Image (cartoon, rainbow, N blue to C red):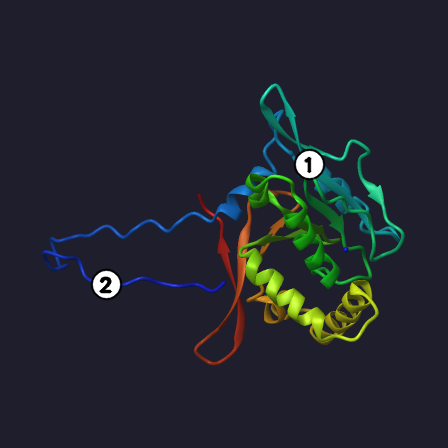
Amino acid sequence: MGSISDGNGGCIDGGSVGPGNNVDEPEPLADPSCETLKNLAKPGETDADITPVVKELESKTALDKEYSISYRKDFNFGEEYSNPDPRGIQEGESLNESPAITSGFWYGTIHTHPVGTYGMFSWTDVNLLKDTYEDLSQDEHRLDAFIMIVNPNGSLYSLKVSDISIMKEQIDSLLEFIPGNNETDKINFFNRQLQLAYSKNPNGLEETFLDRFGFHGFQLYKSNVDNPSNWSKLNLSIDIFGTRIVEETECSL
């Protein structure tokens, strides 16, 4: 308020593969988080329809405050709706803070990272994702849990939980050994450390974030305000020369 590719190989019982013996490659499994992110942009009556919201948030990134809006599940005669906070976009108290609602049926928050801040998630953001996921009252809505940032250049980033057990274990173990009077003090400490890392690599924010959080039970995705139904999954890998690169894999269903 902020994954690793794999492959499968093997034999086919009962014959060999060669010319004239074509074997269809299995279709890659769809990423359910990709589907839920794409669904956020659907314009239907029951859908979140975030497109006009992220465009409006982008227009506020030049202001001297952070802005945000949270989303919740509503129900009417058995029909499920994904609705924004009826109060609309909320103004925060500073460049780095804005309201977010968790608990019950609130399943996600979109907020700005204004000009003068880093366009990547903070430790506060990561903790917000964990709280959003854990505070949902119904398990079936946890797949929908998300946080998202809107940057001045129109880029969108989202975080989705991939394994809540790993996420809790990683965050709790880190917080346990950091000095501080309470969780807020400890998260602020981590925020400062992460900001320092971003400052050392301002053109490689994705790489820095993935280097620190690549195995923490959540996944980073990227899109843009002009087409927020088109998402890509980001992962960190090493090329044949030993250079770290961010791999961008387009979401497909």
- Report the quarter where the C terminus lies: top left
Mark 1 neighbour class, 10 Å CA radius: few under 14, some 14 to 19, many 20 or more: many
The image shows a total of numbered marks equal to 2
Q: Which mark is residue 72?
A: 1
Q: Secondary structure at mark 1?
A: strand
Q: Is residue 49 above or below residue 153?
A: above
- Of residue 201 and residue 39, the one placed in the foreground of this image is 39
Q: Are marks 1 and 2 in contact (CB under 8 Å)?
A: no
> What residue is shown with label 2?
10
Residue 12 horizontal side relative to residue 122, left or right:
left
Please tell me which residue is depicted at 43% across the width and 78% down the height of the picture: 240
Kind of residue at disc 2: Gly
Q: Is residue 205 visible?
A: no
Q: Give residue 15's quadrant in the image.
A: bottom left
**In the rendered structure, which amino acid carries the disc numbered 1?**
Arg
Which marked residue is nearer to the observer: mark 1 or mark 2?
1
Give the side of residue 31 with respect to residue 9, left or right. right
Residue 207's disc number = none
Left or right of residue 247, residue 43 in this image:
right
Q: Position of residue 179 (x, y in %)?
A: 79, 75
Q: CA distance from mark 1 to mark 2?
A: 45 Å
Determine the residue positioned at 60% across, 39% down.
138
**SS at mark 2 in the image:** loop
Crowd tier of the residue under label 2, counting other residues whose Cα lies within 10 Å: few below 14, some 14–19, many 20 or above: few
Does residue 125 appear anywhere in the picture? yes
Q: Residue 235 versus residue 218: which sits nearer the camera?
A: 218
